[in-house]
Image (cartoon, rainbow, N blue to C red):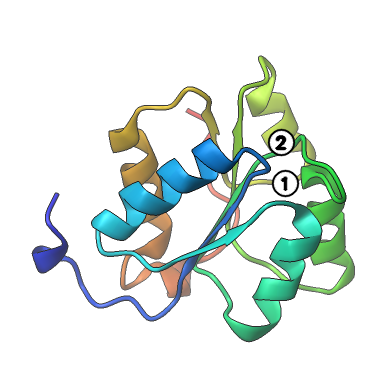
Amino acid sequence: MSAAVRPVRTRPILAVDDDPSILGLMTDILSGEGFRVLAAMNGAEALDLLADDPPCVVLLDMRMPTMDGWGFAKALRDRGLRYPVVVVTAAENARLWAQEIGADAYLAKPFKLKDLVRTVDRFCAADAESSIGPSSAYQ
């Protein structure tokens, strides 16, 4: 996939993971595909980033210190915020966890890089803003 054929995106991707290697990998791959990526090491950092730069999608690990994925999802609901959320976890029950928090999709670690890019493309396409909402992404 080439960044040259992608539409200009104004909204970033918010990647949230306490593992610096996973966070760096997601940031590097998606930046290389022409996306702007905001990185947070936990849910509390992610909430701080939302105020200034609303994302087109949140890539959310579930097990993190300070504020985990469940706490982040609850804080979004409590604030009346709605962004597409993709749970990214190594847990065997990734699908169940995604459903528990009302996520729009999930990626099980280790994930294929093409699946990461394809998932982000689905939520960050130029017309995605008009179709934000729960999806049947549990494939």
Answer with left or right where residue 119 lies relative to residue 62.
left
Image location of residue 8, percent across then percent down: 25, 78
Q: Nearer the viewer, residue 98 or 53?
A: 53
Q: Name the residue under label 1.
A: 102
Q: What residue type is labelled 1?
A: Gly
Expressed as whole percent of the image width and height from the top left, the position of residue 37 reads 45, 64
Q: Write the residue at 66% across / 14% down.
A: 92
Q: Is mark 1 on a helix, strand or loop?
A: loop
Q: How crowded is mark 1: few (under 14 residues within 10 Å), some or many (20 or more)?
A: some
State the image coordinates of residue 51 (x, y, percent, origin top left). 70, 82
Q: How far apart are marks 1 and 2 (CA)?
A: 5 Å
Spot occupied by residue 32 in the image (x, y as percentages of width and height): 25, 55
Q: Which of 120 and 24 is in front in this view?
A: 24
Closest to the observer: 116 or 38?
Answer: 38
Q: Is residue 105 visible?
A: yes
Taking the spot 43% from the left edge, 58% from the top edge, the residue there is: 123
Residue type (three-letter) at the residue carrying disc 2: Gln
Residue furthest top in the image? 92
Residue 17 quadrant? top right
Q: Which residue is drawn at 72% across and 46% down?
A: 102
Disc 2 target residue:
99
Would you identify the image quadrant in which residue 54 lies? bottom right
Q: Residue 111 carries which label?
A: none
Q: Which residue appears farthest toward the front when viewing the image?
A: 20
Residue 60 drawn above or below residue 75:
above
Circles 1, 2 touching at the beta carbon (< 8 Å): yes
User: Can residue 136 be seen in the rendering of this structure?
Assistant: no
